[in-house]
Image (spheres, rainbow, N blue to C red):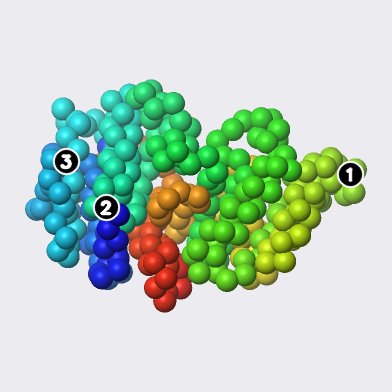
Amino acid sequence: MKNFSQNKKPRIGVTIGDPAGVGTEIVLRAITDEEVLACAIPIIIGDAHHISHQARKLDLICGLEVYNPTEELPENLDSPVLYNIKNLPAPVEMGRESPEYGQAAGEYIEAAVMLISAGQIDAMANGPISKRALQLGGYPFPGHSELLGYLTGVKDYAMAFVSSSLRVVLLTTHLPLAKALTYVKKERVERTLRLIDRELRRWGIANPRIAVASVNPHGAEGGLFGIEEASELIPAIESCNKDPEMDIRGPFSADTVFLRAAHGEFDVVLSCYHDQGMIPVKCLSFGEAVNVTLGLPFIRTAVDHGTAFDIAGKGQAEPRSMIEAIKLAARLTSASSETEVDPIRL
C-alpha cells in the first residue's frame, strides 16, 4: 500500500454521510478551512451531482475536480477533489430519513475502505449517518464502527472520543443498557484495555495512563451497590497490570473520574456503557470532539454528532467537529508513520 503521507500531506477520504443530513454542508465548509488545508488533502466521497447542487444552494465552494471509480487518483494531488459515487438518481429530499439515503451512506463508507485498500488514500473521516436509515438501506450494523469492523475483518475494535481536554473509550456502544451490562466481563474488559494501550502508543503516547470507570454508583461501595467491580473490572485491571509496561488504574466512581481525566490525571478513561462516557464528552467538548475507531488497520475518525435532519440544507450547520475530524485523521496518520507530531491534541 502506498503511503502518500511519507512525502506530502496525507490524503483523507471524507465521506459525506447521509445525503439528507448536514454532512454535505459541513464537509464543504471543512475543506476550505485553512487548518485542514495546511495538514491534509481531503478527498470528498459522495454523489457529485448532489454535492454540487448543495454547494450552489448554500453558496459554498464548487468546481472541484471530479474522479470516478474507474479512474485512479493521481499521485500529485495538492488540493481537495471529489470522488464520485453516483448513487442518488433523484434530487435528495433534505431532512428525510429513508432506506435509499442509508444505502448511499453505506456505499460511501465502502468506497473509502476500498480506496484505502488500493493505496489511493491514507485514512478516512466520516460525516454523520442515520443508524436507522443505514439498517433500512441493507446494512445490518448499529453504526460506523461495526460496519468498518465487518469490512476489514477486525474483531477487536473500540469506539473512542478525543477532544482537547478528554479522551474516552467505550466498552460497549449502541446497546440497550440492560444488555450492555451483560458485556461487562473480565475477558472483554481486559481485551479492550490492551487495545487502548496499544493504540495510544501507536499515536505517540509513550506510557498511557488508563483509568476505568466503575459500573455502579460510588464504585459499588465494596459490593453494597453491585458486584461487577469485584467480579469483572478489578480482575481485568490486575491481569493487565502484570505487564510492567501497562498502567491501568481504578475502577473509579464515574461521577468523578472523567473530571479527573479532563484535569490531566489520566490519558484516557474506559467507560463501561455508551451514555456513561458520552455525557461527559458532550458536556465538556460538544462540537469539537472527534470519534475515533481503535483497532482498525487504518486511521478512521468521524464527527461527534448526528445528521441534524431538522437543519439539513438550511445553511445552519456548524462544521467544527468535521474540521477537527479531518485534522485528527491527518495527525494520527502522521503519528503512525513515526512523524514528529503531537497526535492527540486538537
Q: Amino acid type of disc 1?
A: Gly
Q: Which mark is residue 119?
A: 2
Q: Is residue 332 visible?
A: yes
Characterize the local packing of mark 1: few (<14), some (14-19) or many (20 or more) Cα atoms within 10 angstroms: few
Quote the CA–CA distance across marks 2 and 1. 52 Å
**Residue 207 coordinates in the image, percent (x, y):** 62, 70
User: Which of the two labelled residues, at mark 2 and mark 3, occupies the earlier sequence position?
Assistant: 3
**Residue 224 coordinates in the image, percent (x, y):** 90, 43
Q: The residue tagged with tag 3: helix, strand or loop? A: loop
- Residue visible at 41% across and 41% down in the picture: 152
- Residue visible at 38% across and 62% down in the picture: 333
Q: Quadrant of residue 22?
A: top left
Question: Could you tell me if the residues under marks 2 and 3 are in contact, i.e. CB atoms within 8 Å?
Answer: no
**Is label 2 or label 3 in front?**
2
- Residue visible at 59% across and 33% down in the picture: 175
Would residue 77 appear left or right of 276 to someone viewing this image?
Answer: left
Number of numbered tags placed on the structure image: 3
Dot 1 corresponds to which residue? 223
